[in-house]
Amino acid sequence: MGEGCQELVDPKEEKLEEVIHRYRSQKGALIPILQQAQDIYGYLPEHVLRHISQQMKIPIAKIYGVVTFYAQFRLTPIGRNVLSICLGTACHVRGGAKVLDTIEKELKVKDGETTEDGRFTLEIVNCIGACGLAPVISVNGEVHGRLTPEQIPGILAKYE
């Protein structure tokens, strides 16, 4: 390369290499590597899993087994806003299912899916920890409680 030319390096790939290098010689390092890779990319793309497999000398089947076993890992990109709806006992008894139906109709997604425009990812959880405010949803960690289905369109409109 000529003087002044530099090879373009993806900063995400650079961070992933640092993570792999840090854990390379540690036993049981797969989960921390996957967690940090997901923090870097927002999810775990196939090329990242294959790279981890090659670098750590772990069969790709084992990596997929771990990724699909633990709910914390995502194989698809998430939306700009993560909407968690609680269907634990208190929320369910107080109308959480009706709130969920409204959200699914408004966003045209089911549990674990992301809207076509990438605006929301919907996830059903068993507890948000705000049982006194049931039924509740959390959008990016911001809790909305004592919900009725009629409130959902206004709440969704606040998030781009």
Image (tube, grey):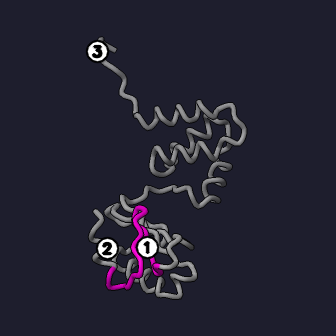
State how far apart marks 3 and 2 are (Cα). 51 Å
Residue 7 relative to residue 37: left or right: left
Using a 10 Å C-alpha cutoff, classify the residue at mark 1 as few (fewer than 14 neighbours), some (14 to 19) or many (20 or more).
Answer: many
Residue 130 relative to residue 65: left or right: left
Residue under the image location 71 percent in, 42 percent down: 28
Residue under the image location 57 percent in, 82 percent down: 89
Residue occupied by mark 1: 137
The relative height of residue 88 versus residue 159 in the rendered view (above or below) is below
| C-beta proximity under 8 Å, tags 1 and 2 | yes
Q: Give the mark nearest the N terminus, 1 or 2.
A: 1
Residue occupied by mark 2: 155
Residue under the image location 51 percent in, 55 percent down: 75
The magenta segment:
133-151
Residue under the image location 31 percent in, 73 percent down: 155
Q: Amino acid at mark 1?
A: Ile
Using a 10 Å C-alpha cutoff, classify the residue at mark 3 as few (fewer than 14 neighbours), some (14 to 19) or many (20 or more).
Answer: few
Residue 25 relative to residue 97: left or right: right
